[in-house]
Image (tube, rainbow, N blue to C red):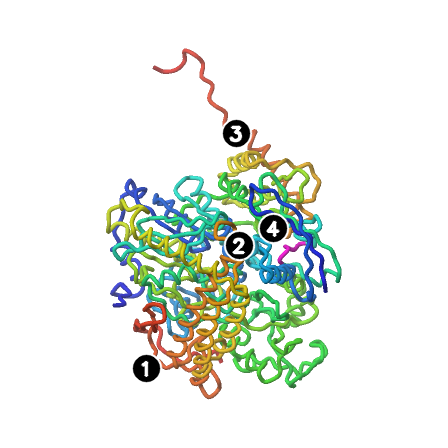
């Protein structure tokens, strides 16, 4: 059933071959096709702009007031590209190799190779758009190194790379909007996918200002709606990031792949208050120059600067001499948890480790450190009231990114014909762990260089449709959505959706977070089901559906998070191996590293929705590793 | 801490609004300003009253969603921060705070503290881009960008489009916003081919959207969470003069000299 449509032949030529085999649409006919793009972050805005430039009629949807708000904007550190400008041995092959290995051998080789190839085009494209990347004095592009790799291939714009790349894509999109090729629908949230004869043919949206439920028909639907870290309530994601679009598509038949591959980022500001509404990431580029440590003594309450050198445990440098502080995210996170569990954590809660710039300031001077990381230090001070030039930062891991997502083939089409998925919303490129500075790369590769080829290829195989929203399928979907909204509004219980969300998140973090076991997962499953039942009995949403109602928006998203949470636990329970970010305590090496079980789990787990209350059905896409040999990852 | 709040409540653009008084209790200094509003909204929900609508998303000062006036100051008046980055440790027990939406003709109120800032998008549509269709870009390092130009471009591109500059300006001018985008793109070698047209078009779009003009109050720079300097408005004005003089004039046609 799962045909990934990977081109045959050598991997180096796969994408070229695929592009050549694709069908083309005559420029004069392109405006007859309507492309629906949901989401206008890096992947969505880039795809919408690029398809608009080609001449397709694009309808682009976002729940934000403007595309420039998408959460891609918050990415800090940088974007990888195999340019080898540093002459330090980088190449497409090496970026490919690093990404497959970093993903702990649970990604699809052909996709990753294409990603590495396209990385170089992305930098060219973004520079041409005017993205203000960091420069050397000679005017050439500067790069830095990042976790999990030994070359310097990360391009950056201070600590706001995501913002600058998103603004580039946003500006390209706005240009197309003014040219009339793209019509933007801001403050419009997708609430359902509409299928006609088994093909994705439209969506149902809610206008977040007026509450109007609208239907939109098209020839193809592209989802670029981001990840689902917020199922854990506390994460580094923006508050509105949610799974509704992909979950609704899943319920309509799109398989959901590897939902349990959720990434915990090692360098976030620790939790301080029970009312905390989100966690703030400090870019892991900080690990280039910051050194991670905890006191050797348990419960050492001295100020960090009072703890002498010999009583500090630089545990990452000690355990991983060759990668040191630059080990991949999953390894860094798990080690932080371990030292905190041993009672050596720092800060008021004991849930934190130090990230110390003392040596970097001595070596480089305070000015150079400020130039590289100034905005991050400022941000840290605003939140914690501490000056990290003087005392070490405190950091702790937090939910950050989800490698899982809707299953897509090599051409980024889901198991629903005509439904394409790009960016974090799909599952394809990062396996069980994403390397730093690879999310921006993947979002833009999908948006600028993959979807603008594969979507037209799909369109070319059919004539432009005459379908409009008077088709019964739209009417039915619209009625279902209106009914669901009425349900949420009329429960009239006692608790807000946010309070349920917080409780659900805590449950998942404790039982399906950095370490998972059969017992904890079974417990989580049972509790999630109970809580979900309670949600539908005791929810209170004040107001009506015919107005701007933020509580109603949240309630709908939380309702979908409940269903996804269950699937995450089921997936984590079934995968009894550890791999990347998925750490089953039953499966570890003698020195506590994640131990894969390639014999039984070298596959992508793609789940089929079987109906409310029915267990989901597992489909497996076997993964073959022909170019990167399966090894136990070692960063020692 | 206990905080007294006076909040602008308005159910939609068409209906009139008014201030209403609220009291929030049990606020701790480690909470953020928006978390304080979360607590208020939980209370309101429990009482069956409509929660206060306010825009927010990343809650780390980069997405530009949030923004309202706190005691008349955009984003609360703390230097270089958005309202989502405000911590309650900057306030005292018993403080009275008045919260109201951005006030500008170009930013109609949608509900409570939420305004419609789509006028900013239309200014960008008028020319806030460098035309570079996907796939047509030359090799990245073939375009040399002097470090100083890249730095200036970055300082300007840091704008998050929150609208505080407009809200703070007595003229409700969008010149800091527009000047930031123009300085970003006009400072770069890649931005030169469209420099004049971009400037003319974006300046025209500002007036079309009913934003006022700059009269050098400097309030915009004072409240800008990204500390965009007012000098950029000077850059914009210079570019506008340059573009005006360099504008291609229509060819003069002398009667009787046209070819048949």
Q: In which quarter of the image is residue B173?
A: top right
Secondary element at tag 3:
loop
The vertical placement of A560 against A450, above or below, is: below
Q: Which mark is residue A543?
A: 2
- Do callouts 3 and 1 point to residues on the same chain? no
Q: Quadrant of residue A632?
A: bottom left
Q: Distance between the residues labelled 2 and 1?
A: 54 Å
- Name the subunit of mark 4: B
Would residue A372 be visible to someone looking at this image? no
Q: Earlier in the sequence, mark 2 or mark 1?
A: 2
Image location of residue A380, percent across then percent down: 64, 64
Which one is closest to the eye, mark 3 or mark 2? 2
The vertical placement of A187 against A287, above or below, is: above
Looking at the image, do the residues carrying marks 3 and 2 touch, with CB atoms under 8 Å apart? no
How many numbered circles are shown?
A: 4
Q: Residue at x 66, y 54 (%)?
A: B80
Q: Residue A32 carries which label?
A: none
Q: Which of marks 4 and 3 is nearer the N terminus?
A: 4
Residue pointed to by mark 1: A599
- Do callouts 4 and 3 point to residues on the same chain? yes
Image location of residue B111, percent across then percent down: 57, 48
Q: Point out the stretch of residues depicted in magenta.
A: B80-84
Residue pointed to by mark 4: B155
Residue closer to the observer: A91 or A249: A249
Q: Distance between the residues labelled 3 and 1?
A: 70 Å
- Side (left or right) of B147 relative to A617: right
Magenta residue check for B71? no
């Amino acid at each position: 059933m799962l045909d990934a449509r990977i081109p045959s032949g050598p991997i180096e030529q796969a994408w070229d071959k695929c592009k050549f085999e694709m069908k083309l649409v005559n420029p004069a006919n392109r405006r007859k096709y309507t492309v629906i793009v949901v989401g206008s972050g890096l992947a969505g805005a880039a795809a919408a702009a690029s398809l608009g430039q080609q001449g397709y009629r694009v309808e682009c949807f976002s729940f934000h007031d403007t595309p420039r708000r998408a959460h891609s904007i918050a990415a800090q550190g940088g974007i990888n590209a195999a340019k080898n400008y540093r002459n330090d041995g980088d190449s497409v092959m090496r970026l490919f190799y690093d990404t497959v290995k970093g993903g702990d051998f649970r990604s699809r080789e052909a996709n990753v190779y294409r990603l590495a190839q396209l990385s170089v085009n992305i930098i060219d494209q973004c520079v041409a758009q005017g993205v203000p990347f960091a420069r050397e004095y000679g005017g050439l592009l500067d790069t830095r190194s990042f976790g999990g790799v030994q070359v310097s291939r990360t391009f950056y714009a201070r600590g706001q790379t995501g913002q600058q790349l998103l603004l580039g894509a946003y500006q390209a999109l706005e240009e197309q909007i003014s040219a009339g090729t793209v019509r933007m629908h801001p403050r419009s949230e997708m609430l359902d996918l509409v299928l006609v004869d088994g093909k994705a043919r439209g969506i149902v949206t809610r206008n977040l200002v007026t509450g109007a439920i609208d239907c939109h028909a098209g020839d193809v639907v592209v989802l670029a709606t981001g990840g689902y870290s917020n199922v854990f309530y506390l994460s580094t994601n923006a508050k509105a990031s949610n799974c509704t679009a992909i979950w609704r598509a899943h319920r309509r038949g799109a398989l959901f792949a590897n939902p349990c591959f959720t990434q915990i980022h090692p360098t976030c500001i620790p939790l301080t208050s029970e009312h905390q509404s989100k966690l703030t990431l400090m870019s892991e580029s900080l690990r280039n120059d910051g050194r991670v440590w905890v006191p050797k003594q348990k419960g050492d309450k001295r100020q960090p600067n009072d703890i002498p050198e010999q009583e500090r445990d630089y545990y990452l440098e000690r355990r991983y001499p060759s990668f040191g502080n630059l080990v991949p995210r999953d390894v860094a996170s798990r080690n932080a948890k371990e030292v905190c569990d041993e009672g050596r954590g720092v800060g008021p809660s004991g849930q934190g480790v130090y990230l110390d710039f003392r040596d970097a300031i001595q070596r480089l001077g305070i000015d150079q450190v400020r130039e590289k990381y100034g905005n991050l230090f400022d941000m840290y001070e605003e939140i914690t009231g501490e000056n990290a030039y003087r005392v070490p930062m405190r950091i702790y891991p937090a939910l950050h990114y989800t490698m899982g997502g809707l299953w897509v083939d090599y051409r980024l089409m889901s198991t629903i014909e005509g439904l394409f998925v790009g960016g974090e919303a799909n599952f394809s490129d990062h396996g069980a762990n994403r390397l730093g500075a690879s999310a921006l790369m993947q979002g833009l590769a999908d948006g600028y260089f993959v979807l603008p080829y594969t979507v037209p290829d799909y369109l070319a195989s059919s004539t432009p449709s005459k379908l409009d929203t008077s088709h019964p399928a739209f009417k039915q979907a619209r009625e279902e959505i209106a009914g669901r909204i009425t349900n949420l509004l009329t429960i009239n219980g006692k608790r807000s959706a946010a309070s349920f969300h917080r409780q659900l998140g805590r449950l998942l973090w404790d039982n399906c977070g950095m370490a998972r076991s059969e017992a904890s997962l079974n417990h989580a499953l049972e509790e999630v089901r109970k809580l979900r039942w309670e949600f539908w009995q005791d929810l209170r949403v004040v107001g009506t559906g015919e107005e701007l109602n933020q509580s109603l928006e949240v309630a709908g998203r939380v309702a979908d998070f409940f269903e996804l949470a269950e699937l995450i636990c089921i997936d984590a329970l079934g995968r009894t191996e550890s791999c990347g970010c998925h750490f089953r305590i039953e499966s570890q090496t003698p020195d506590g590293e994640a131990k894969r079980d390639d014999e039984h789990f070298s596959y992508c787990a793609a789940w089929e929705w079987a109906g409310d209350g029915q267990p989901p059905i597992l489909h497996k896409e076997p993964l073959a590793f022909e170019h990167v040999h399966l090894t136990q990852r070692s960063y020692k | 801490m206990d905080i007294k709040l006076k909040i602008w409540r308005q159910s939609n653009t068409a209906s009139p609004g008014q201030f209403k008084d609220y009291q929030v209790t049990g606020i701790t200094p480690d909470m953020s300003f928006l978390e304080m509003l979360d607590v208020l909204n939980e209370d309101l929900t429990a009482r069956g009253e409509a929660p206060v609508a306010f825009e927010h998303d990343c809650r780390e000062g980069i997405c530009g969603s949030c923004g309202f006036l706190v005691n008349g100051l955009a984003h609360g008046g703390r230097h270089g921060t958005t309202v989502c980055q405000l911590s309650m440790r900057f306030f005292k027990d018993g403080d009275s705070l008045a919260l109201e939406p951005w006030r500008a003709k170009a930013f109609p109120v949608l509900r409570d503290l939420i305004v419609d800032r789509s006028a900013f998008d239309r200014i960008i549509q008028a020319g806030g881009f460098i035309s570079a269709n996907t796939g047509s870009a030359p090799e990245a390092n073939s375009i040399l960008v002097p470090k100083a130009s890249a730095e200036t471009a970055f300082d300007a591109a840091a704008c998050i489009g929150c609208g505080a500059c407009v809200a703070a300006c007595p003229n409700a001018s969008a010149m800091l916003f527009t000047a930031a985008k123009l300085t970003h793109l006009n400072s770069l070698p890649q931005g030169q081919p469209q420099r004049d047209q971009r400037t003319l078009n974006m300046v025209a779009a500002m007036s079309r959207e009913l934003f006022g003009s700059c009269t050098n109050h400097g309030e915009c720079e004072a409240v800008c969470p990204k500390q965009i300097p007012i000098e950029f408005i000077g850059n914009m004005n210079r570019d506008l003069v340059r573009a005006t003089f360099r504008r291609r004039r229509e060819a003069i046609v002398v009667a009787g000299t046209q070819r048949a």
